[in-house]
Image: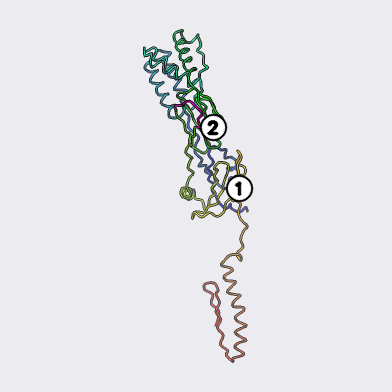
Amino acid sequence: MDAAPAADLVVVWAPGMRTAPVEQAAKAAGAAVIDRSPSPPGAINNAQTVQRGIQAFERLELDDAWKTLEQARSDIDRDGGAGLTRAQLSDLFLYRGLVKIQQGDTSSAWEELVAANTIDPTRQLDPGRFPPLVRSEFERARATVKNKERAKVTFKTPANCRTTLDGSSAIGEVELIVGRHWYRVVCPDRQPEGTGTEIRAGKIDYPVDPAPFAPPTDTELIVQARTAGAHAFVVAEVRSNVATARLVGLDGRERDRRTVSIAGDLSPLADAVASLLKAGPKQHWYQTKTAWAVGGGLLAAAILVPLTAILARDTGSTDITVKANGPPGWDMPQ
């Protein structure tokens, strides 16, 4: 009959990583698995919001179109344009400008067209979709934008993070036209961060340090293990490229641990978990502390009796007293 594992629960915390190897190792040893990794970001509907605004404009529902496109503008200021391509982000401001043209607000329309071209200064409007007046204003805004100063921006982020700028990947130094731009930084072990920012001329190092996800505390894990009826648990955690597996008792004491390097795959962590879960050799009754205590008492008695007898012969006394530390209820005759 196979021995029980050293723990009957494995708690995994590996943000952004495929945890299947660890789960398989745990189940092979007979332990349950709970994945406490942070959930991936939920679906962001920026693209759908922009599209709804465009459709409302095409139906000439200008108030609804502006309300929807204003909502989209507010959303991208909070999330950095998550889920939008460069063309979609440019469309957001293009159609905001078109709404203002239709409403006769030429000043506001101009600002929106300049923003659209700042995001994508190479864009050309399709003559089949846009009337000559709109194309003319758009081209005038594009010429103005091309005469603006430039900035060279390098985003400084933690390792393994991915940065998008105006809907396109930003790797290394990126040249931009000065003005408002939108960035988003996504990291496997940190909370997503993004917003709009004014970029000025020059060479800029732009630091972005998203807040790390907080792993569950040992106190939280103990409560969860007790709720699950576990007698001990293994915590498998990944931080950057280092993973740690810890064997913890319900008293909160760490009994053993393994630390391994991770390079995109959790197989080394799975091996560490399997090693901790492996049951130790079965202990026989005579190897226990109680058995050794009893055995020690018997040994003391075995030595004491002959010595006392010898001393009795030398002194003439025949009284012999033997005291041995035997198990409870075991009295030696006197």
Name the residue: 47% across, 32% down: 42
Report the span colored magenta: 198-205
Badge 2 is on which residue? 162
Residue 201 within the magenta-colored segment of the rendering: yes
Instruction: Where is residue 260? Give x, y as percent.
Output: 60, 46
Q: Is residue 102 left or right of residue 217?
A: left
Check the image and report above or below for 129 versus 275.
above
Which quadrant of the figure has residue 266?
A: top right
Tell me which label, 2 or 1, sits earlier in the chain.
Answer: 2
Check the image and report above or below for 168 versus 212.
above
Instruction: Where is residue 226? Give x, y as percent.
Output: 48, 50
Assess disc 2: are there few (<14), some (14-19) or many (≥20) residues with their C-alpha within 10 Å of its C-alpha.
some
Q: Give the residue at the far bottom of this rendering.
A: 316
Q: Which of 296 and 255 is in front in this view?
A: 255
Q: Which amino acid does label 1 sit on?
A: Ala
Instruction: Where is residue 329? Give x, y as percent.
Output: 52, 73
Question: Which disc number belongs to residue 312?
Answer: none
Residue 126 within the magenta-colored segment of the rendering: no
Q: Tag 1, which secondary structure?
A: helix
Q: Which of 152 and 286 is in front in this view?
A: 152
Instruction: Where is residue 233? Give x, y as percent.
Output: 53, 50
Which is more foreground, mark 2 or mark 1? 2
Assess disc 1: are there few (<14), some (14-19) or many (≥20) residues with their C-alpha within 10 Å of its C-alpha.
many
Check the image and report above or below for 91 versus 258.
above
Q: Check the image and tell me how it is coloured.
A: rainbow
Check the image and report above or below for 5 versus 172.
below
Q: What residue type is labelled 2?
A: Arg
Question: Which disc number belongs to residue 272?
Answer: 1
Marks 2/1: CA–CA distance? 29 Å
Q: Give the residue at the far top of this rendering.
A: 132
Q: Nearer the viewer, residue 220 or 177?
A: 177
Q: Tag 2, which secondary structure?
A: strand
